[in-house]
Amino acid sequence: MLPALARALGVDLNTLLSFQDDLTPEEIGRFSEQVTVVAQAQGCAAAFRLAWEKMQEFPSCDLLTYTMAPLLEGILSLFPPKEEEAEPFRQEVLQLYQRAANSHDPQISQWACALLAGRYIAQNQLEEARPLLEQLPRSHKNKQLLQASLARKERNIAAAWTLLEQELFTRGNGVLEVLSHLMDLAAEEKDLDRAEAFAAASQGTAEALHLPAASRLSLSLQLALLRQDGPQTLALLEEIFQSIHRPAPFSDSPLYCHLPEKDGASKGQQMMLRMMVNGVEEDPACAFLRGLPQYALWMKKWQKSAFPKSNP
């Protein structure tokens, strides 16, 4: 039974029965350099042979497979054999990617699935691409882009528009989140010049990507609070509250005109408005606003909008 299993796995019996630890990332890095040197000196076939010998020695080391697949693919491109001899090498590379896609390590598996899916889509092998995309979690950074590529190949253009617009909106807000963290660091170091630069970058990005005012003005508001600039803070809060109270539909923007309006969005916006109104009243960082002569009337107006049933 064991010899048959060894043959099925493409390893010898000694390898099957060995209990060698997996290679460390450092060892794999050094071996990759060795494979590259062999490719330069002896050609593609020798490099492939060396890599396969190591992978047979460590058949369960998914990180080795993960590393060898793109390395050997690069070697095949840089040191190509004769065209009539190239196809077996291409198939070996494909086999490595497929093996990596079945790895028990989620990071390796997802990387290989995404890469293979992209290739199959480009080659119009859509049936092969679909199950690979299904293996990717919703949180995978490239899943939606790959789904959009698949939709385009299937001539489902409406779906492709929606997927890509969703991705643009999500990634745009992701950039603003990073800028927000950078601004927090600058504020902790009391470097208001850098904080202002991050706020300006955030506003410029949000304007270019047609993001809502609540996103566009968030860091400018934070900067005004840091400076305790009362009039500027109230002006920014007014614009943000107005955008939440009467949001512009996605269809108003040429960047998001295929995005559907969410069911129940108005309830969510009302809840957000309530949270922000309460936040201004309760946040110690906003306490200085109460010294402004226009604050009480302004707050009363927004409490009435945020909590209409509580007002007579």
Image (cartoon, rainbow, N blue to C red):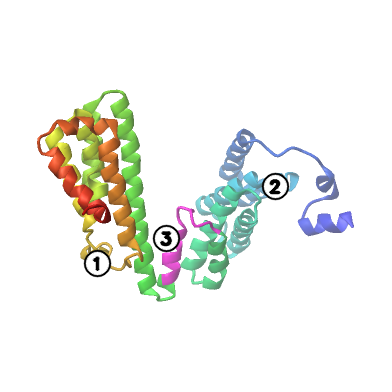
Residue 288 location, x and y as percent?
A: 19, 30
In the image as oriented, which residue stretches furthest toward the right? 1
- Indicate whether 18 appears above or below 74: above
Residue 216 location, x and y as percent?
A: 23, 47
Task: Tell me where residue 255 sits by quadrant.
Answer: bottom left
Q: Quadrant of the C terminus?
A: bottom left
Is residue 140 rendered magenta in the image? yes
Q: Residue at x 29, y 40 (%)?
A: 279
- Indicate whether 65 appears above or below 228: below
- Which amino acid, by three-letter code, is at mark 2? Met
Residue situated in front as seen by the camera: 16 or 281: 281
Q: Residue at x 49, y 62 (%)?
A: 118
Residue 238 location, x and y as percent?
A: 17, 46
| Marking on residue 55 | 2
Q: Residue at x 31, y 39 (%)?
A: 179
- Which amino acid, by three-letter code, is at mark 3? Leu
Q: Label 3, on which residue?
A: 145
- Indicate whether 186 appears above or below 55: above
Looking at the rendered image, the disc whose residue lies closer to the viewer, 2 or 3, is 3
Q: Is residue 198 left or right of residue 5?
A: left
Residue 15 location, x and y as percent?
A: 81, 46
Q: Is residue 102 left or right of residue 250?
A: right
The residue stretch that appears in magenta: 136-151
Q: Residue at x 57, y 48 (%)?
A: 107
